[in-house]
């Protein structure tokens, strides 16, 4: 579903991403780890068509992203680190609006509410203004959008940052549901607990290169940390990824 073929991006002669080869099939959760500046977010931006590659190609459902980035984004749901909704609109109204922007027909209010609840939004919140939503609640509106559009791919950039443990568990459960329905999931994260919980495979990036890919089957959070550290030993050893920047507990979402 998602594929990169020798995908590269340079800025001022410095390689932010260097000849990435990667395939993520339908139904797989692939978690991308690495220190800041390793090329993880650049990878997401190239799949989303937010930036053009210096060489190589990104594909979504077999379609080359660079010639038609808008077409590629119609097949993708994207959860950035900070999801922004229209605060004066309800969850249902935000969902209907974004569905309309994507060209999809907005379902009935009852179906919009059902989609939001299925994505994990608390009962009753669907009809409240989104200005009062926690970060986790805002993310669930995007996950409901992914389901409503039957998006073939779900891309997430540090989605657990700032979430309390309960919200992280609920978000991971929602991501698993997207995987179970057949979406290819690419998640950039420092949250090793979330990786151990939902990943099918793990990729480790360093200095713009994908240096290791491993199965996550049976791995604990400690196993993932050990695997990560193994690739950053020696004089240039990087610090382990920081724990999720979880704020003081917010309303469970």
Image: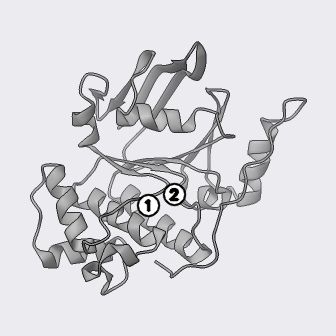
* Nearer the observer, 105 or 247: 247
Disc number lying in front (1 or 2): 2
Residue at coordinates 45% horizontally, 52% vertically from top-left? 80
Residue 161 sits above or below residue 231 on the image: below
Image side of residue 3 versus residue 243, left or right: left
User: Pointer 2: what residue?
Assistant: 159
Look at the numbered disc 2 and give the secondary structure of its residue.
Answer: loop
Residue 229 image offset from top left, x and y in percent? 80, 43
- Total numbered circles: 2
Residue 196, image quadrant: bottom right
Give the residue displayed 44% in from the left and 27% down from the top: 4
Q: Quadrant of the N terminus?
A: top left
Tell me, what colour scheme is on the image? one colour
Q: Say whether residue 227 is visible.
A: yes
- Ranked by sequence position, the earlier of labels 1 and 2 is 2
Tag 1–tag 2 contact (CB < 8 Å)? yes
- What residue is drawn where x is 29% and y is 57%? 146
In percent of the image, x 80 and y 36: which residue is there?
A: 232
In the figure, residue 13 lies in which quadrant? top right
Q: Residues within 10 Å of mark 2 (few under 14, many from 20)?
A: many
Task: Please name the residue that numbered disc 1 is placed on.
Answer: 175
Quadrant hosting residue 235: top right
Q: Outermost residue toward the bottom?
A: 124
Residue 78 in picture, x, y percent from top left: 37, 49
């Amino acid at each position: 579903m998602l594929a990169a073929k020798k995908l590269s991006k340079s800025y001022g002669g410095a390689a932010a991403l260097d000849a990435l080869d990667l395939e993520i099939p339908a139904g797989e959760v692939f978690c991308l780890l690495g220190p800041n500046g390793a090329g993880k977010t650049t990878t997401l931006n190239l799949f989303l068509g937010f930036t053009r590659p210096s060489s190589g190609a990104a594909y979504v459902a077999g379609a080359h992203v660079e010639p038609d980035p808008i077409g590629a984004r119609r097949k993708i749901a994207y959860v950035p680190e900070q999801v922004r909704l229209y605060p004066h609109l309800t969850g249902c109204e935000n969902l209907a609006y974004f569905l309309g922007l994507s060209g999809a027909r907005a379902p009935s209010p009852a179906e919009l509410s059902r989609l939001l609840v299925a994505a994990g939004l608390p009962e009753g919140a669907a009809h409240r203004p989104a200005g009062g939503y926690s970060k986790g609640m805002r993310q669930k509106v995007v996950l409901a959008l992914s389901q409503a559009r039957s998006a073939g791919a779900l891309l997430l950039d540090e989605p657990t940052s700032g979430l309390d443990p309960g919200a992280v568990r609920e978000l991971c459960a929602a991501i698993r549901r997207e995987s179970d329905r057949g979406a290819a999931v690419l998640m950039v994260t420092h949250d090793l607990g979330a990786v151990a919980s939902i990943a099918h495979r793990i990729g480790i990036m360093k200095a713009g290169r994908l240096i290791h890919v491993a199965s996550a089957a049976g791995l604990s959070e400690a196993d993932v940390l050990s695997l990560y550290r193994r690739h950053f030993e020696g004089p240039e050893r990087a610090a382990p990824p920081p724990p999720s920047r979880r704020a003081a507990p917010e309303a469970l979402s």
